[in-house]
Structure formats: structure tokens, C-alpha cells
Amino acid sequence: MKFTLSWLKDHLETEASLDEICERLTAIGLEVEDVDDKAAYKPFVIAKILTAEKHPEADRLKVLSVDAGDGKPVQIVCGAPNARAGMIGALARPGTYVPGIDVTLSVGKIRGVESHGMMCSEKELNISDDHNGIIDLPEDAPVGTSFASYAGLDDPVIEINLTPNRPDCTSVFGIARDLAASGLGTLKAPKAPAFKVEGETPHQVKLELEDHLCPGFAYRLVRGVKNGPSPKWMQQRLLAIGLRPISALVDVTNYMTFDQGRPMHVFDADKVNGALVVRRAKEGEEILALDTRTYKLNPNNVVIADDNGLESIGGIMGGEHSGCDENTVNVLIESALWDPINIAKTGRAHGIITDARYRFERGVDPEYMVPGLERTTELVLEMCGGVAAEKKVEGYKGHQKKVVDFPYAEVKRLTGLTVSNDELRQILTALGFEILSGDETSARVSVPSWRPDVDGKADLVEEVMRMHGVDKIKPEPLPPTGSVNAKILTTLQIRTRSARRALASRGMLEAVTWSFISAEHARLFGGGSEKLKLVNPIASDMSDMRPSLLPGLLTAAQRNADRGFGDVAVFEVSGTYEGDTPETQRRVAGGVRRGTASIAGSGRMWSNSAKGGGKPVDVFDAKADALAVLEACGIPTGNVQIEQGGPEWYHPGRSGTIKAGPKVILGTFGEFHPKTLEALDVSGTLCGFEIYVDALPEPKKKATRTKPALELSAFQMVKRDFAFVVEKAVEAGAIIKAATSADRKLISGVNVFDIFEGASVGEGKKSVAIEVLIQPTDKTLTDEDFDTLTKKIVGNVEKSTGGTLRA
């Protein structure tokens, strides 16, 4: 919403400066977004042409001697046909920025003659579109003074950023009313329009739609108008806010839109054929609007029509056919009310943005419908002449004011402000509210017709607060929680973050995939239930809520491979769905590795190829990722059970299930079944996992106490290798667990680095070689200490697995 300072002072009697007005506007909730103080016009001065001689090298140019009031004539080369000796105009010296041509002047030569500036046209100063000659001022124009001040171009323009709930401030008058209520001046009472009425308005208007879509329609015929340019003051104000002056009739409607927040429309009455009908548009009806675009309408749109067809899109834009031009003699002035929601839907559906739509969709003052017609008529008669006929009003049943019970104590309770009852009543009255009845504790307050945003007592508190001063609310600290390190995040939130960090630290990239997948993909991963089908899917291949993160991650990995990034590791921690209730939504951490994107691609690992590094991913990479998530979530991996085999989308012999007891499944991992990859149109070597974060048991609550800082051991770590011959069915994890339990204080880790099968170890047997990491903490270990520890390790493995130490 833009307006000029002088425009505001038409309605507000105040001595406040521009800075004070802007500061107060922001303080009362009308945030000032920009202020143009018109400083760009200050360099232009009124100057007199002393002589005008023909240019020696150009027939259409003249060499001027110009006096700017300082007694030092300057030479200017000018091409304006009306430039002459004795003429007074606007001078721009070198260094001046000329907005109409977007040029900063400098001293230059034109056909060999130096020019020290320019005499300006109205177009070059963005005053109008006239560029047929330079500005020609009256003889009494004060030479040497500011042209901007003389022409009224130094009027600052203020732009405020309105919130959608303040339709009353889409007018300059409404903004002045708010400022006056805040104590910054006095609101000037508008004068009642005075003009003579002669004759009747012969046109008829019929309302053929629900009342709420057009609650009222006021109109009047004005005969014998002469449509020409609007007055200079009106043109300047419209130009200042970014509107192009067109003609007096059109400019008056634009002026009323901004001055009073009341959009108006004028029809050329001689182009209206028969009665005007306000109705719903018919399917496929078209209208050529004033913006020269053709719109195809439908029954959701309200229109004004006559026997010729459509004449206007109600409340949004008029039609080109009945628009006013220089030949208009008789006009029909319309002031109507429109349903805000219907206006918003129509404007949005057809992409039409107008100042009328902006106001009607927020809600205009219904009680100003008729006064707005009267004021517009008065302006038309002043500028265009003519004779006004009697007004007609159709359909309007009056405005039913809302009444709110307002306990004064609500101001203190909701804002903390202490405001006296007298000040409360004074603020509300100044804003247009009416105190119907009440005592020293409460009142019944009538809401003015221009405030559709006020519904209850909280809205009245807001009005008092912004006028009394939001800056007067004293800041208060939040009440203490009673504990400095109280837990803020839930366990699930903490584990979600921990899982993300753990997987990222393992070289995986986080992905965000669609929650919707195709029905075919959903069935592949245990979904496909009717409860999980979308009523209105955004695409045919996104019809079901996902039962697993893996389909999205697999297709994401394939898209990367299709673009040349075959070795990729991606993960996601998000929701999956087993039903349509909150209880059946899961929080899952899932990941997929493809190609050679293995975390164990180097180092001393039993699975590394003979050539070293670059091995394809396999089930053990997926297992390592899954266990890393469990560790990050605070679940000791030594306490879980891993069973061979997983869901059917995994390879049956290269997958596993992680459990906490016989019934609680914590997750699954493995290489993907070839049939699954084929159904997803995914190729390559892939493995993946899913951990059900919401299924992890809650950590046991322990008494908290400060832990000493972690210190590095002063003693060197020692590695010892062991090879055990066991039955083929014995899992390597059992050997690791047995070796670790030999001495948990000294043994910091156990890794499998080799597996061998052959005749030398016996039929049905295998050799598993492990590396034991021994970290002394309080002393250097002796040979006797190592012998004792070695016997414990061997004994534990033999007892747990039945294996023997390989010679």
C-alpha cells in the first residue's frame, strides 16, 4: 500500500515529521517497508532561456543560453521544437540523474558544441508521457528555485506492508484514522458530498445469484460528461504510487480505490444494451477485459452482463467493450459488494491481480457502498461536468454489527500491560468501536463495519495493545525449569539424530525420498494394503504409502548409477507405514550401498580381494552399517542375536535378522534378491539394511554423575593373532564373542581377518583367524600376563564353539 505524505495530510491534521510518522506507523502494526523522499528531484531547478540560436551543424538542434538564477548563464544544446528565448523550464546540470531516460548527465559535445546539462520534458522527469517538447512554465515561475518544490514533485512516498487482516488500512483514510487514534494528530471529518440530482436512472440491474456473492449493488447515471485528463494533482498522486493516469473517469475510480479503499467501476452507459444482470458465468463464456486479455470463465465466477454479453468480471476487472474513452458522454457509476472468498478464488483461478481484487478479497466496508457512490459522483461532476440522476440500490439489506463482550482484565492477562479503563475506552472509540454498555470491569463493544477482522475479545486486546504501545510491554524471563541439564529431546529424537550422524560418519550420503511409491513396489516390500492407498495420488506411480525405505533408496542409487556414479552409499532416517493409524507408523533408519562403496574397502579384512581394495559390497557391509546404528542408539551389539535369513526381498543365503530376544525384531540386512532388483529395474551389486529405531528398548535409567574425561592410555596396544578350526556351521560372531569375554578390561577389539577351508583342516571344517587388540591400562604386561590371557581366549573359544587352536 503506497501513498504520499500530502495525501495522508488531506485526512490527518498533524505537525509530525516524515520520520515520526513512519516510526509511528511501524509501532502500530502498519510496517513501513520503504520511503521515497524524492531526493532524486532535488537537483532540478527552474531556469530561463536567455537566447536560442540555431546549431551550426544541425538543423533540428538549438544552442541555448540558460540562466539558473545565479547570474552565470550556461550553454546547453537542445533538440526540443518548442525551445525559445524567454521560455522558463526545468534545468538538469551535469551530474544529475534523469529518471525518465535512466541517465546521469555529464558535460559533452553534440555535433561539436559543448552542452552543460539539459532542459527537461515531462517524460524525462516521469511526470507524464509527454515528450513533444520541454517543460513550459508560467512567466511568474521563480527562476533559481527548486522545480520539484514548485511542481509538487517533492512529496515523499510511503509504502507499508499490510497483513491480510487489515482491509481498513488499504485506504489512505483508514491509515490516517489509525494514526489519529495513536495520538499522532487529528482525523479530519470527511465532508458530505453536495451536488444536484436531476432525473432518474433508467437502467435496471437484476441479481440472479445467491445474495452472499453480491450482497449489494448501488449505481447511478451521469449524463453529459466530458472525459478528458484528470487534474494535475490527481495525476501526480497516481504516478507517485505507480499508477498511470488514463482519463478523468478512470483516474477517479483508481483514486477512490486508494483514498477510501472503495473500488469503483464506470460503464459507458451508451454501450450498455438492456438491463445489467449480476449472475454466474456460463461454462466457456469469454470476456475481453480492460487489460486486453481474453478470459474463459465458468459458473464459479460472478459477472455483470447485458444483452451484448459479458461486461465485467464482478469485483475484479471491467470489460473492454463498455469501457470509457474520450467519446464517452453518459456514464453508469457502479459501487457494489462482492463475496471475498469468491473474489479470491476467481482471481487466483485466472491469474488476475488488480487493486480491486486486493481489497474485495480482504473485505471492504459494506456501509461505505452508497457513500462511495456519492463521493465518486461528486468527483466526476467536478472534473467532467454533467448531470447526476437519482441513485439506485439493489439487494443491500444493511450491515449487522458484531457485538463483543470485553472484560477489561483481559488486557493485563494477555499482554501484561496496565491500561486504565478510560484509556481503553478512548482507544476503542478513536478506532471507530462503540461502547454500548458496561461498568468498571467490562463493556459490550460494537465493532465498526470496516473491521471484519475483529471477532472476539482477544482482537480488542490487540487493538488496545498496539495503540497503547507494544514497546511498553516489559520483558520477563522465563520461569526456571528446576534443572540445568533437563532432557529436552525425546529418546526417539535423540536416536534419530545419532543414527544420521553414525551413518554419515561411515561415508554414506543422506537422501530424502518420496513417502509414496507405486503399488507394485509396495507389494514387493510387504505393503499393498488398501489402508495405505492414497485417495488422490499426485501421480499414478505414487499411489501407496511406503512400507519400507529401501525401494526409494534403491531407485535413488540406480539414478546415480545411470548418471555415472555407480559406487554410491545412501541412507535415510524417516517414516514407513504399516497401517493408517499413528501407532502403525514406524521410524526407520535404512541404507543402501552399491558397487564398491564399501566401508571395509581397505585394511586387514578377511573379505578383501587378493588384489586388495575395491571389493564389491556384500552382506557384511550391510551388517556393519546396521550394527553401527544400534551402537549409535545406545544398544550394545553384544546383547543382540543375529539369525541367518531375512525378508523375501533379500537373498535368502546372504541376509540376516537382528533380534532382541525371540520375538522383538530390531532390524534386517543383506544383499538384495535378484528378482527384487529386476522388479525395481535396478542393476548392479547392492546390499542394504533397515533398523527399526522405534522398536529399540528404552535405555535403563541410571543415577547420573560426572564422568572423568577420557584419557589415552600411556601403554602401547598389542595385537595377537589366533586361528581356530571349527565346524562350518559355527558363526564367526560366536568366536568373536567368546574371545572378547576372556577379559573385557584388557581386550579392546576382535576382528576376523581370514577364513580358510580345505583338506588340510578336515572335512566339514573351516579355519577362522582373528586379531585380538590388547590395550593395557595400568601397567606393562609381562610374558606371564600374556600367557594367562592367551589361555583364557583359547579356553573360551573351545568351550563356546567346540573349536580347537590351529597348529
Image (cartoon, rainbow, N blue to C red):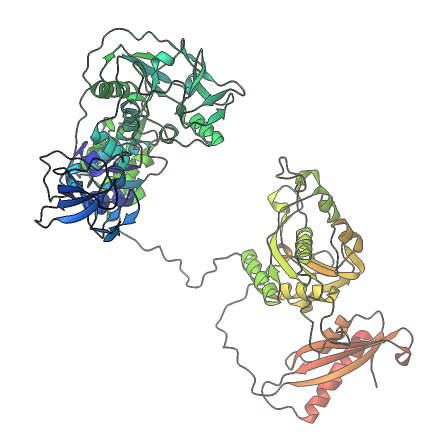
Side of 668 where 233 appears, left or right:
left
Residue 670 appears in the rendering: yes
Residue 106 appears in the rendering: no
| Image quadrant occupied by the N terminus | top left
Q: Residue furthest bottom?
A: 783
Side of 539 where 682 appears, left or right:
right
Residue 644 percent coordinates (x, y): 78, 62
Front in this rendered view, residue 661 or 166: 166
Front in this rendered view, residue 414 or 75: 75
Front in this rendered view, residue 281 or 222: 222
Q: Residue at x 84, y 86 (%)?
A: 807
Q: Residue at x 27, y 20 (%)?
A: 227
Quarter of the rendering containing residue 531: top right
Quarter of the rendering containing residue 45: top left
Q: Residue at x 52, y 78 (%)?
A: 710
Residue 434 percent coordinates (x, y): 24, 27
> In the rendered image of this protein, does residue 395 appear above or below residue 642?
above
The image shows a total of numbered marks equal to 0
Residue 777 percent coordinates (x, y): 59, 85
Residue 392 percent coordinates (x, y): 31, 11
